[in-house]
Amino acid sequence: MIEPQEPTNGVLTAPGKEDRSGEGALAALAEEIATYRNHRPQLLREHMGQFVLIKGADILGTFPNYSTALREGYRRFGIVPFLVRQIADPEPVVYLPHVVP
């Protein structure tokens, strides 16, 4: 189990994965998105409309709503990055107004 760690330069990281630039958090997010995409066909067949909790390469469960999945992530890991995403087809478009490509 990953234990919460104190923040470093405002970024929370798992033990042994300290990264002061934020690149570690982006790499972790990329891994979690890849995990979702790799398991998406099965998730769509079995859990359409639910929310999946992913930490790294591990799918930790599916939940009926976003808040339940988020609470479970905080219960297991504390305030560290993890992914909660709705299992949907087509995938919803997310607009981030202050992000420049």
Image (spheres, rainbow, N blue to C red):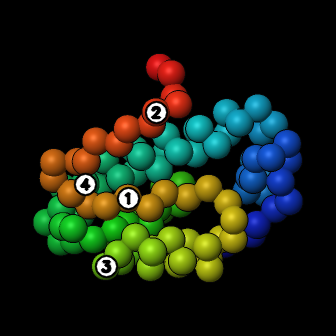
Position of 41 with respect to 86 (left or right) is left
Identity, as a three-letter code, of the amino acid under mark 3: Pro
Q: CA distance from mark 4 to mark 3?
A: 17 Å
Q: Which mark is residue 64?
A: 3
Identity, as a three-letter code, of the amino acid under mark 1: Arg
**Circle 1: is it few (<14), some (14-19), or many (20+) Cα within 10 Å?**
many
Q: Residue furthest top?
A: 101
Q: Residue placed at 27% from the left, 71% from the top?
A: 50
Residue under label 1? 85
Considering the image in quadrants, where does the N terminus appear?
Answer: bottom right
Q: Residue placed at 18% from the left, 71% from the top?
A: 46
| Comes first in the chain, label 4 or label 1 | 4
The label nearer to you, 1 versus 2, is 2
Identity, as a three-letter code, of the amino acid under mark 2: Pro
| Comes first in the chain, label 1 or label 2 | 1
Q: Residue placed at 37% from the left, 38% from the top?
A: 95
The label nearer to you, 2 versus 4, is 2
Identity, as a three-letter code, of the amino acid under mark 4: Arg
Q: Is any atom of residue 18 visible in this view?
A: no
Position of 49 with respect to 59 (left or right) is left
| Comes first in the chain, label 4 or label 3 | 4
| Comes first in the chain, label 3 or label 1 | 3
**At which x and y percent is residue 71?**
54, 77
Q: Secondary structure at mark 4?
A: helix
In the rendered image, which quarter is residue 60 located in? bottom left
Q: CA distance from mark 2 to mark 4?
A: 27 Å
Residue under label 2? 97
Residue under label 4? 40
Q: Which mark is residue 37?
A: none
The label nearer to you, 4 versus 1, is 1
Position of 95 with respect to 78 (left or right) is left
**Circle 3: is it few (<14), some (14-19), or many (20+) Cα within 10 Å?**
some
